[in-house]
Image (cartoon, grey):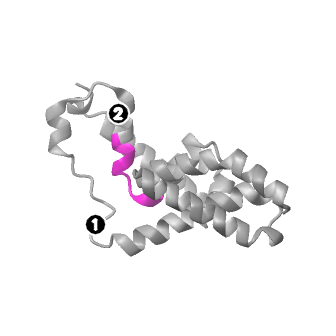
Amino acid sequence: MTINEYNRCVDEFSDAVYRFLLKNSRNVELARDLVQDSFLKLWLKRKGIDYNKSKSYLFTTAYHTLIDHVRKLDNRQTENDYELDTAITEHGYSDLKEILDFAVDKLPAIQRSVVLLRDYEGYSYKEIGEITELTEAQVKVYIYRARLFLKKFIGRPEMVI
């Protein structure tokens, strides 16, 4: 990859990588830092990376950088913590986007990542598998489970009222 191709990668993909990391981390500063780390890794390996595969490389790198950060930071919280926040039920949301964002935040990290890659970024099952190092079947299972949880979560009367 040439310097011009690298600069094109920054222009074309930085917003998408940032959105992906922000949706997963829910932390603006962390997302910015992880985007920088991902592009630094791309820069360091630019000579061995084909420009046509740079988008996939960036998302894979961003995903792994986020997972590494989460593992270092948070071994205290379990991934299956689906307890409904009492402040949310007392507030009574009526905006479906807010409810969906809240529900997506409740998903385990891997399910949240595959759903965001599929439904927000539009990747195919195969591409998601390459990014997350999962098989296509595993990706489909995680997406199915995530969507099932989202459907049940949003279907609660106290969430929509």
Q: Which amino acid, mark 1?
A: Gln
For residue 77, the mark is 1
Q: Is residue 44 visible?
A: yes
- Mark 2, residues whose alpha carbon is within 10 Å: few (<14), some, or many (≥20)? few
Q: For the C terminus, which image quadrant? A: top left
68 relative position to 14: left or right: left
Q: Report the span colored magenta.
A: 102-110
Who is closer to the viewer here, 57 or 135?
A: 57
Checking the image for residue 98, the label placed there is 2
Element class at badge 2: helix
Q: Position of residue 160 (x, y in %)?
A: 27, 27
Height in image: 5 above or below 92? below
Q: CA separation, marks 2 and 1?
A: 23 Å
Q: Give residue 147's quadrant in the image.
A: top left
Q: Nearer the viewer, residue 66 or 35?
A: 35
Residue 5 marker: none
Residue 106 counted in the magenta span: yes
- Kind of element beneath mark 1: loop
Q: Amino acid at mark 2?
A: Glu
Residue depicted at x 62% and y 56%: 128
Q: Earlier in the sequence, mark 2 or mark 1?
A: 1
Instruction: Report whether residue 129 is seen.
Output: no
Q: Is residue 81 magenta?
A: no
- Residue located 72% across and 72% down the image: 44
Q: What residue sits 40% from the left and 75% below the top?
A: 72
Give the residue displayed 71% in from the left and 54% down from the top. Answer: 55
